[in-house]
Image (cartoon, rainbow, N blue to C red):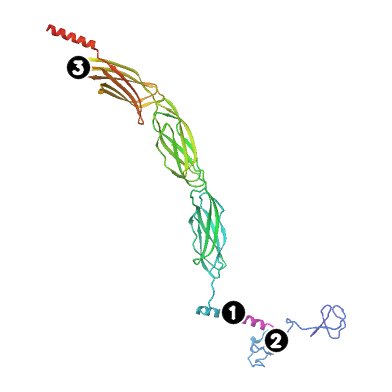
Amino acid sequence: MQNLCPQCGAPTKSGDKHCRACGAKLGEQVHIAPTQAQRPMQNLCPQCGAPTKSGDKHCRACGAKLGEQGRITLGRTPRIRKVITACILALLVALIIIVLGNLGVLEIHKVVDGEIHTVSCPSLVEGMKPFIVSIEVLNSGNVEADFKAELNSSHLTIISSPLTKTIAPGKSEAFEFTVEPLYNGQEEVVAPLELNIFADDVLVDSRPWNLQILLVVDGKINDISCPSSIEGVKPFTVSIDVLNSGNVEADFKVELSSSYLEIISNSPTKTVAPDKLCTFEFTVEALATSQPESSTSLNIKLFANAKLVDSRSLMLRILMPKLEFTSMDFEPRIEWFDRMCVFDVDLELSNLGQAAATDVIVYVRLDKKEGEMDSYTTHIEYLGPASSYPITTTLDYDAFDDYQFAIEAYCDEGGMCIARSDWFYAYPDWEDLMLVIDALNWVFTFT
């Protein structure tokens, strides 16, 4: 035991009345035991733990042989023993559990479970462009398992699905789907989704999700290429550029209508992507009319997925030819000795319209009692506006009687005739016939 000053704690000797360090008056002195650090090193027998002295070769208690390993510090032996004992017991318990589990004696409870941790999906989708749906799955069981994610919706098309993933307990993995809206005729719809998670082919979690889809079907007539004036009934082309101004792919169709125009060939329905242009071409021709000049409206309608989205109207000027016989002359003469009546015909056909006439057929016919006796036909390839064409021919008939002529001219363009028809009557010159008869009588008389 050691005496200490109660004031400063300095060591004192027995009999001191004042502290040699601080001078405090000493009364009953404090006695403390030496700490473990102040304890001297002591040799112990490693076999029985009895104290030994330096130089002993055998333990005085058990007789065990002593060496350098017998020297251990007092106070550390119990702690080391506890650690070693705990490790040995843990290894023994683990070994027993493994052996009993393999033998089927001890059944270890396995939990296969999982849950949808987070979902990443847009709440509003515009158009038909693909987008990503991401699902983070957590393995909440106590064993490793194979996880699979499924996405079901009647309003979406699954472009690509994720593969099965093996996830360790307490870990999470992301599953990504590439999907796009499915157009079903509705432009705005709330699409319900069903997200399912399977662990080792067992459904472990399910979650509903609502997605708003906005689909716009729209288009407009971007440009029209069409002549403002039409001459005659020759076919011409109408070209229409259409723009898909919606956000979904759509089937576009263009329809033309007019009172004085005929649509010879229509353009088929075409599928146009969003923000893309498409050209529709039509072959059109004017209907023949007796008016040299007229106007008509060309009505254009644009449909997208059978819905009218745009319409336009154009005014077109139609110019037509106008044919007339401006000069007609018929000179009959009789060929008595050939017993034939001959007519010299001089005609002039003029175009009084504002458009050229092409493929003009002129037909002159000599009729007798509604029966055709002689005729003449000529072809004029081109007869411009304010121009004329002369026609000269001879028609004959081998009888003496009254004659009537039917003179026709028509312009055949597009199957429509612009015709001019006239009837004329001609009679033989009987005075000349009497002169011939008198001459014949005089000859017979003198012979």
Q: Amino acid at mark 3?
A: Arg
Choose mark 2 or mark 1, whichever is in front. 1
Pick out the residue farthest to the top: 446
Closer to the N terminus: mark 2 or mark 1?
2
Residue occupied by mark 3: 339
Whole-percent x, y for residue 40 in the image: 72, 85
Q: What SS does tag 1 mark? A: helix
State the mark number for residue 364: none
Q: CA distance from mark 2 to mark 1?
A: 32 Å
Q: Is residue 254 left or right of residue 33?
A: left
Choose mark 2 or mark 3, whichever is in front. 3
Closer to the N terminus: mark 2 or mark 3?
2
Q: Which residues are magenta?
A: 74-89
Q: Residues within 10 Å of mark 3 (few under 14, many from 20)?
A: few
Residue occupied by mark 1: 90
Q: CA distance from mark 2 to mark 3?
A: 176 Å
Pick out the residue farthest to the front: 369
Q: Amino acid at mark 1?
A: Ala
Residue occupied by mark 2: 42
Q: Residue at x 23, y 19 (%)?
A: 397
Report if the CB atoms under discs 2 and 1 are less than 8 Å apart: no
Residue 190 versus residue 380 in the image, above or below: below
Q: Residue at x 44, y 43 (%)?
A: 270
Q: Is residue 15 left or right of residue 87?
A: right
Residue 240 versus residue 41 in the image, above or below: above
Q: Residues within 10 Å of mark 2 (few under 14, many from 20)?
A: few
Q: Nearer the viewer, residue 196 or 4?
A: 196
What is the magenta segment's predominant secondary structure?
helix
Closer to the N terminus: mark 3 or mark 1?
1
Q: Nearer the viewer, residue 213 or 142?
A: 213
Q: What SS does tag 3 mark? A: loop
Whole-percent x, y for residue 328 in the image: 32, 17
